[in-house]
Amino acid sequence: MTATITPQVTSPKPDAAPRPAPKRTFRQRLNRWDVKYSPYAYVAPFFILFGLVGLFPLGYTFVVSLNNWNLLTGPGEWVGLGNFAAELSDPFFWNSLFNTVSIFFLSAVPQLIAAVFIAAVLDQNLRAKTFWRMSVLIPYVVTPVAVTLIFSSAFSEKYGLINNILEAVNLDPVMWKTDVFPSHIAIATMVNWRWTGYNALILLAAMQAVPRDIHESAALDGAGQFRRFFSITLPSIRPTMIFVIITATIGGLQIFTEPKLFNPTVSTPGGNDRQYQTTVLYLWDLAFNRQSFGKASAVAWLLFLLIVLFGVLNFLISRRIASTEARVVKRRSAKALARSRAEAELTSGFVPGVEPQLADHPHHTEENR
């Protein structure tokens, strides 16, 4: 007699009620808030300061430019874009714009070339490197007023050091403060003397970030010092070069102190004939001498748009140069790869598209034919 065993079927237990999440303590909530909101608190001071000293003055200047604003009486009648139209038809504005762009090119181009050269020299293994690197920063530390007064005396037309040297070598003295082009050269010299060392140190920091093993590999391949500089160093510091160019552009188009103090004896800012009156100096003359804040604000906005235009052009040119160099490097790499493959195939005795000759095979003898 066999006993039958009936399986016991257990009824499923009813679903247990979900446990409530443990309540976070105040310290846990504080840590959560810290992770979630503290980054905004860290970056908030920058945006607050930028709004106070950047965006608000820019917007307020645009509002002033739309009114016939006087220095003493305050806001006047609404003129809309009349101040912009008046300045765009004023020959003094175009004269100041020409002087600004002329001084900018005479200062920015030699300044950047000299800064790259000085940075390349300081990047070498020199003795007393710290001394030389700090020495190039001395002109930047000196106040612009002192620099301008010293150079103004040196470029004096009657008893200046430069004209005395020219007369000593039987050359005619130059009218540094009267003629247009010589005055631009003199002011550009002051700008170059002050800012070249500062830009050189920025470029030097970028050059030192280039890995040394790349230079060592290129030197082992036979590349000389100049070839390594133009093929490795300059392409590697391109972002820093773009930064230096943009900052030099902004500073060069806003030049004020040097032309203002270059010849303090004249009553008209920028020379008797406004031969070196820059746009910022012309803006200052409109605001504080002619008491026309509306037109001065319009000139400020026109200068702002000009700086933005130059910055965009610098960016486009730099990106075009970078893309061109990338295509050239890619083409050279392809040629080098094809050349190495051809040399490898010639070394192995196999040429694509040509049947191997049996007579040239070392095991092909008369017995095998």
Image (cartoon, grey):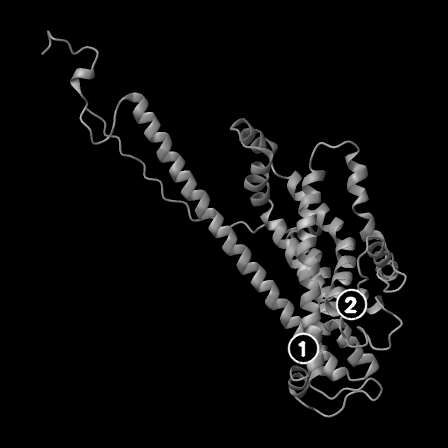
Q: Quadrant of the C terminus?
A: top left
Q: Nearer the viewer, residue 305 or 360?
A: 360
- Residue at the far bottom: name it: 77
Spatial separation of the CA atoms under disc 2 and disc 1:
17 Å
State the residue at coordinates (75%, 49%): 197
State the residue at coordinates (66%, 56%): 109
Q: Is residue 242 above or below residue 98?
A: above
Which quarter of the figure has residue 65? bottom right
Q: Quadrant of the N terminus?
A: top left
Q: Amino acid at mark 2?
A: Phe
Residue 2 x/y as whole percent? 20, 25
Which quarter of the figure has residue 85? bottom right
| SS under mark 1 | helix
Residue 268 x/y as whole percent? 83, 77
Residue 94, disc: 1
Would you name the residue on which mark 2 appears? 256
Q: Nearer the viewer, residue 80 or 366?
A: 366
| SS under mark 2 | loop
Residue 50 x/y as whole percent? 71, 65
